[in-house]
Amino acid sequence: MKKRIISVSIVIVMALSVFVGCSDAPSGKPTAPDVTGVVFSDRSVVYNGQAQSLTCENLPAGVKVVYENNIHTDAGTYNAKAEIYAKGGGLLKTLDATLTVRQKSATVVIDNKTSVIGDAKEELTYTADGVLEGDDLGVTLTVDISAVGTKQIQGSYKNNNYDVTFTGGTYSVEPPDVSSVVFVDKSAVYDGQRHELTASGIPEGISVEYENNAHTGAGTYYVTAKLYKGTYLVETRNAFLTVAKKQATVTIDDKSSMVGTTEELTYTTDGVLAGDDLGVKLSVKTSTSGIKQIKGTASNENYDVTFVGGTYTVSEEFMNNLTLETTDDFLPNYAPFALQNAIFTESVITSISFIYSKLVSGYTADSQGLYMPVYVVKKDFTTKQSECTVENGKKILLDFTGKLVGVKSGDVITADGLHIEIGADETLAFGDAAMTVLPRYTKRDRSYPFHGKIFESKQSWNDRSLMFGIVGYSTKNVPDDDKTYISFLGDSISTYAGYSNSTAYNDTIGGNAIWFPNNNYSGADLIVQDTWWHSSAARLGYTLCVNNSWSGSVVNTAQTYNVRAKNLHNKNGNRPDVIVIFMGVNDYAANTAVGTYDGTTAAPTAPSDFSSAYGKTVATIKSAYPAAKVFCCTFLPDRKRFSGGTNGNGINETAYNDAIRAIAENTGCYLVDLYADCGINESNIGSYTVDRLHPNSAGMTKIADVVVSSVQAVCGVSAAA
């Protein structure tokens, strides 16, 4: 600033008049000096810190010069003016010229620097060359060190008197050394506690952030450890955290019941943490007799569950008050008797009941040694009595010692807890001459002791009215217990040629009308695997038992609630474990009255409206297949025949579906609410059907999705699903 003040002072001085040859002119009129040869030339110099100026040349005597904007020190281009005046003060000439002060060349050499990411930036330094003493270039150096790598340090300067060239100047940002960090896999067994991975060997200044770490449940987890220096991500490490399943054991209790009924299935667990629930579901088929294995599943993924035990004996009542007719000719002794029809073959007898008659003379009701023998003999009666012994298991003594106190003639007495095995070519014979407890038969309302003889004479009785019962279970033609059978009762939406009208499944369905596949509508020529019912069975891992669907059928007809409802078993003897009913849309289209039946009372024997017919259908199914789980589906909108959801009698489709919902809830069935849950509605039904009623492939999938999830929620997920 001081230099600028001095320069201005000089300009002021220089602006004063400069006289050249100012002696007095001779007396008389003055003569103007000749200034035509005066030169005021441009000048260019390099900045050197000194004041620079322009000067007129060839000035004649008797003139003075006044300069303007002359004399400058700093680099720049200046337009100077020179005014030449005569001695008397008159302006003789004005001249212009340019004074150029050029920038001085200088070099700034920037020093190289290095630091670790996240650390403070090193001071940026340099050396300058070509700078006049006392001058300051006003250098500023900058560099971004937010990332690892080598960057060029950028330089700028403010002193306009110099033309500065920057050289050198790299800044290397190095990552921190994290080679000491250890982050490795870890395994643990589920114990209800949280498990996590932790990195070790972390250097000072390094922080760790974990992702997908800290887990309690069993599983294998891919855990990430991110190593940071400040906000900079130095490195990412990965390792596996494995929480293994805990071993647990479920011991299933053995059970038994009659065919079609199921005792509550119970179990005990071992190895389960307090407060945990294994989510055990037990199932067994009791629709046929035999010794079955109770099957178990566990939904708790934290345990590896082993199921042990759990046999279920399903008994079948073979004979109870069996009516036989005969003559009055009896043998006069108590020889063993048998039935000519060998109904006990391939069986296991668990209980025998009969009417107590009387005791042989010399015995009392509470005496010892009261028994009745039962023999296992060839069904052609070629077995000799001597061949049947207790030792070989062919003679079984039903012991009633001490059990007849208070029992009078005509009372029913029972021997249970038996296990009498009868082969394919065998049957049973009862009693002998020495028995002390006698069965009896009735004829014309009179009681008689039963006489008969099979050994040696090969006689058997085939026409008596016997008042006793046999309980057991068959060991022949038992369906494969590894299969779960599913049957369907439906209308046209559920039909398919070769399935819903095939006597290969059930002799009564051969005349069922079918709708699918249908070449009259685009998208209706489905393959059977695309139908909702076939897809549902496949996805559930179930075996089709019978699809008893009939195109155009209604619920409100005896053909449905009295006939089709009890023909859902196949001709091989398999009975359905799961039954799905998908009907009602044709009752709605037929303007059938809804009615008020809701399933809280017994279903009417002669239905007159939709709800009572639906209730009768359900009652028939549950009576015919007491062990089956029954699922009732609401039906979808019918926009082929009705545009507004109201039929010809002004009844809305929702009224029929409300009846289905109520009956399902009150009769122990399970609801599949397709109308509410499958996503097919009045606004989009054109996209999911071929004719605004019958589903296309996409619509079938929508239906199957809800059916499968509903059945799985009740029955669990099949291993084949």
Image (tube, rainbow, N blue to C red):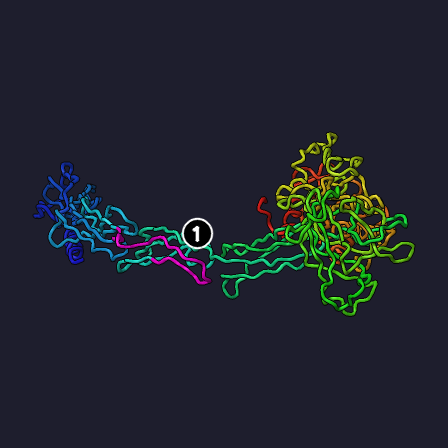
Judge whether residue 575 is colored magenta: no
Tell me the magenta residue range. Answer: 175-198
Whether residue 671 is visible to the viewer of this picture, yes or no, is no
User: The residue under label 1 is which amino acid type?
Assistant: Thr
Q: Residue at x 77, y 55 (%)?
A: 433
Closest to the observer, 77 or 291: 291
Q: Residues within 10 Å of mark 1 (few under 14, many from 20)?
A: some
* Position of residue 662 measured from the top left corner of the image (x, y, whole percent): 76, 56
Which residue lies most toward the top here? Answer: 519
Image quadrant occupied by the N terminus: bottom left
Circle 1 residue:
220
> Residue at 79% of width from left, 37% of height from top?
512
Label 1 SS: strand
Q: Residue 566 location, x and y as percent?
A: 78, 46
Residue 526: horizontal and vertical position, in percent?
A: 68, 33
Q: Is residue 184 magenta?
A: yes
Q: Quadrant of the C terminus?
A: top right
| Spot occupied by residue 263 in the image (x, y as percentages of width and height) | 67, 58
Residue at the right extreme? 444
